[in-house]
Image (cartoon, grey):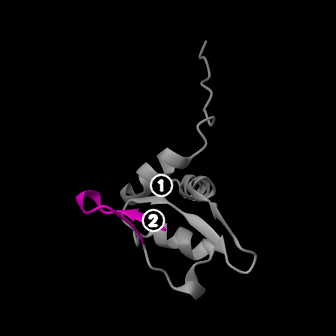
Amino acid sequence: MADDFGRLGRTWREADYEATDLETVIQDLLTGQYSYPFRIVAFNTAERWSEDVSEDVARELRRRCDLQMRALPSTISDFVERHEDHDRRQLTLRLV
């Protein structure tokens, strides 16, 4: 996970190899373990690939906060807004 430290710059955060599954990353983001993340990349060294999964993680963070009827934590709100699907629009109902 890449984290933004403001004027100090951006850096890749060290994470425990055994504890970097999707659920742990989601929980760490929701509990403020990362301050202002800007990119999340998944790696599979056995299959020799990597992929930016920021949009997928942002969508899951939004979904969980919506289900819990809570606001996004301030530490991840910019990340979610930057990476969520921009075609997601809420339609308004016209009151007659």
- The numbered mark, 1 or 2, whose residue comes first in the sequence reads 2
> Residue extending furthest left?
7
Separation (CA) of disc 1 from disc 2: 25 Å
Nearest to viewer (mark 1 / mark 2): 2
Q: Give the residue type that dot 2 points to.
A: Ala
Q: Is residue 93 above or below residue 76?
A: above
Query: Which numbered dot is residue 2?
Result: 2
Q: Residue at x 59, y 87 (%)?
A: 18
Could you say where residue 41 lies in the image, as x and y percent from the top left? 57, 65
**Nearest to the observer: residue 70 or residue 55:** 55
Q: Residue at x 48, y 72 (%)?
A: 28
User: Taking 68 as reference, is 10 left or right?
Assistant: left
Could you say where residue 70 lies in the image, as x and y percent from the top left? 47, 55
User: Taking 3 as reference, is 44 left or right?
Assistant: right
**Nearest to the observer: residue 79 or residue 30:** 79
- Whether residue 71 can be seen here: no
The residue pinned by badge 1 equals 70
User: Taking 62 as reference, is 70 left or right?
Assistant: left
How many other residues sit within 10 Å of disc 1, few (<14), some (14-19) or many (≥20)?
Answer: few
Could you say where residue 53 lies in the image, as x and y percent from the top left? 62, 59
How many other residues sit within 10 Å of disc 2, few (<14), some (14-19) or many (≥20)?
Answer: some
Q: Is residue 69 above or below residue 33?
A: above
Q: Residue at x 43, y 74 (%)?
A: 13
**Label 1 close to label 2 by CB (< 8 Å):** no
Instruction: Locate residue 50: give its quadrant.
Output: bottom right
Q: Look at the image and give the residue range highlighted in magenta.
A: 1-12
Find numbered disc 2 in the image and state the secondary structure of the residue it sits on: strand
